[in-house]
Amino acid sequence: MLMARKLMLFTGLSVLLISCAQPLKQTNKETKKMNFQENVTFENGACEIRHSPATTDKTAGITLAGTLTIPNGQGPFPAVLLISGMGPNDRDYTMFNGNKLFLVLADYLTQKGIAVLRYDKRGVGKSTGTFNLTVTSKDFAGDALAGVEYLKSRKEIDTTKIGLIGHSEGGMIAPMVAAESPDVAFVVSMAGPVATGVDDVVAHAALQLRADGASEELIALDGPMRRKMLDRAVHELDYDKAAQQMHAIIAEYLKTLPETQKTESEKFLFAITQANANDMIQMFNSPWYRYFLTYNPVATLKKIKIPVLAINGNLDFIASSHIMLPIIARALKDAGNNDYTVTELPQLNHWFQTCKTGAMMEYGAIKEVISPLALDTMSEWILARFGK
């Protein structure tokens, strides 16, 4: 549990573990209607995304375990591979409160006639390998590419209609895989981050703090310190030196922070405190986070010619629709992509749950696993282009 909490903190990518949240009963009931499902395994023969066409590296030695759901009726069927966001996620994308986002999504799409493959991340559940902060988004893209290769091997799947649905970090990974593999027919990005630089991360932290109720005084003090920390991750290549510099930055910040703001900071999960300083430094100074800060998602999007759907909730302050969607639209237009849709969905948070404010503490009180609006938007878009 401690490891999961560390991995979920301070990323700007994934809704955070909320210690006061109680397990909630899922309100999406479709999971009782699952058609055919099979537990499967597939080998990661493409440990990293290197160049196009896709190449394999059998020394990876990682076996991914997952579940394939296939619709009733006569195939072959269109199919999607689900790619989860950051953190040690199982195939169902099980949340801190017990909600299972990918279980509900897989079942819904399967009922609509779309086969779905979801899988445990490396080092999680029944998948082999190791999950830690030395594994980057590029490595996870290799795992997803292996999933595409597996879908191609199934007779029930129409290999000309294999797509990717990625949430949060998975929404950044999906275009990486699509740019590498000619076998990917379409991409759906659910709150995928495309603004990942230092200024972008600082801006999103301010948006979330403001939504959580932080004072403008705290937000104004937080920003410069956070920027200094992230700059060290980008520019200081020596990990030990970077860690020392980050410790000094936080120490100076906390030394000069007024008592009012110190007390206030304790209320907000995104705020910087003495209690979470070590976890923050471990995260910011990791290979995973350094890769995230320096990777250029826009350059990858400009390579994508296949159909793309990008959806974001308007109350998502982790991957703001106002920031992300215009960037995605511009990149795909520059790519000469003739079939892309960017859609802002009202009253939805980062997990595409119906909400009121988008505040962190609100996530733990929402019973809905995923909004019917988000489910319908994705299924209708896919079926309009790739339905049987």
Image (tube, grey):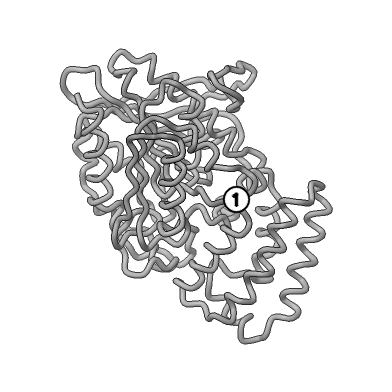
Residue beneath the point at 53% across and 32% down: 141
The quarter of the displayed image where residue 147 is located: top left
Residue under label 1, please give it.
Answer: 3
Vertical side of 58 occupied by 85: above or below: below
Q: Amino acid at mark 1?
A: Met
Q: Which percent across, then down, holds residue 280?
A: 66, 59
Q: Where is residue 110 drawn, in percent x and y?
A: 24, 32
> Which residue sits at x=44%, y=21%?
182
* Left-right relation of 305 to 295: left
**Which image quarter is the C terminus in?**
top left
Q: Above or below — where is 211 with respect to 325?
A: below
Position of 80 with respect to 71 (left or right) is right
Q: Could you tell me residue 113's position as x and y percent?
A: 21, 29
Q: Residue at x 54, y 67 (%)?
A: 269
Q: Which residue appears at 49% of the width and 53% of the height?
A: 14
Residue that protrudes farthest toward the left in the picture: 73
Tell me if residue 340 comes above or below residue 206 in the rendering.
above
Vertical side of 26 occupied by 214: above or below: below
Label 1, residues with CA under 10 Å away: few <14, some 14-19, many ≥20: few
Which one is in front, 47 or 312?
312
Callout 1 secondary element: helix
Q: Is residue 160 left or right of residue 64?
A: left
Apparent side of residue 224 relative to residue 354 in the rendered image (left or right): right
Count of numbered circles in the view: 1
